[in-house]
Image (cartoon, helix red, strand yellow):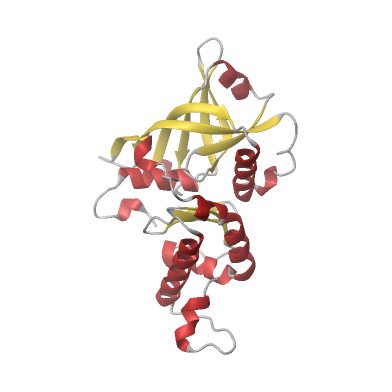
Amino acid sequence: MNDMNASAFDAAATVKRLLREARTGALASLDRDGWPYASLVQVASLHDGAPVLLLSQLARHTRNIAGDRRVSLLVDERREGDELQGSRASLKGHIFRVDGEAEIATARRRFLARHADSAGFADFKDFAFYRVELESAHLVAGFGRIAEVPAADFLTDLSGAEEALASEEGAIAHMNEDHADAIGLYATALLGAAAGDWRMTGIDPEGCDLLCGHEARRLPFGRRITGAHDVHRVLVELAVKAREIAGVPARRRDGDTPADEHRHDPH
C-alpha cells in the first residue's frame, strides 16, 4: 500500500506509514561542543506510533542526549532504484528513557518483535529503551510533496483503547500460531507485498504491523478500534476481504455451515 498512489496526497498518512514500517533510522544528537552527530539505530514503534530505540549507555549518542534531549530521527521507505524517489521524514522531538515496569515491558516486547536479533543484549545493564516524544515531521515524498506535519496529526490517539491494547499480545500470538495463512494474505492481497513468511508484530487502534525477514509493512484497519472484540472483528473482516481478492475459499471448521465460515476466521 503506497500513499503516493492515492488520488489526494495525505501527508499525515504517509508519515504514519513511514513510522510504522521503519526498522532503522539516522539519529541526530548534539555533541557537547554543539556539533550535530548522526548515528544509525534500530527503530520500532510504540502503540501511539512514537519511535522506541534500544540504546547502550556507552554509545556516543546516549551520552549526547544525557546533556541535551533534542534529537532528530530520519526514516525512509528504502525504495529500490533511485533512493531519492522514496518518501522520507525527518522527525523532531525530545528523547527520554522509558521508565515504569509496564512501560518497559511493552517497549521491550514491541521492539524485539521487530528486532529479534537484539534479544541477546536487550537485558544487559548498560542498555535501555528510549522513547522519542515527537514535535513534528518534515516530509519529503516526491516532487511537490513536501510538508511540515505536526505530531498530533500522525500519532495515534490511545484514549479509551485500553482493552484493545491489553489484548494485543494474546491476539498476536494467536494469529501467528493459528492463522499464518491469513497474515500472508493480508500482506500479499491487501498490501501487494511478495509472498513469504509473514507474521504479525503489533496491533494498535488504527492498524497492525507485519514483518517478513527485514521487510516491515503497515496494514491500516480503516477505522479506529478500542475493544478486544473490535480487534477480533476487524481481523476477521480483513481476512475475508483478502481471501475475496485472492480468490481463496474461506476456511471452515467441522460442522460449520457456510454462514458460520466468517464467524470463526481468523480467530
Residue 253 occupies which quadrant of the picture?
Answer: bottom right
Image coordinates for residue 182, horizontal then vertical, percent: 53, 70
Q: Relative to residue 27, is residue 7 drawn left or right?
A: left
Q: Is residue 241 visible?
A: yes
Image coordinates for residue 121, horizontal then vertical, percent: 73, 38
Q: Does residue 261 sit above or below 190 in this rendering?
A: below
- Quadrant of image for the N terminus: bottom left
Front residue of this view, candidates 5 and 16 = 16
- Quadrant of image for the C terminus: bottom right
Image coordinates for residue 37, horizontal then vertical, percent: 53, 21
Front residue of this view, candidates 150 and 104 = 104
Residue in the picture at 31% in, 43% down: 11
Q: Does residue 209 sit above or below 184 in this rendering?
A: above
Residue in the picture at 56% in, 53% down: 166
Image coordinates for residue 34, horizontal then vertical, percent: 50, 12
Q: Is residue 140 visible?
A: no
Q: Relative to residue 124, is residue 78 drawn left or right?
A: left
Front residue of this view, candidates 237 and 100 = 100
Hey, which residue is sitting farthest top in the picture? 33
- Count up the numbered dots: 0
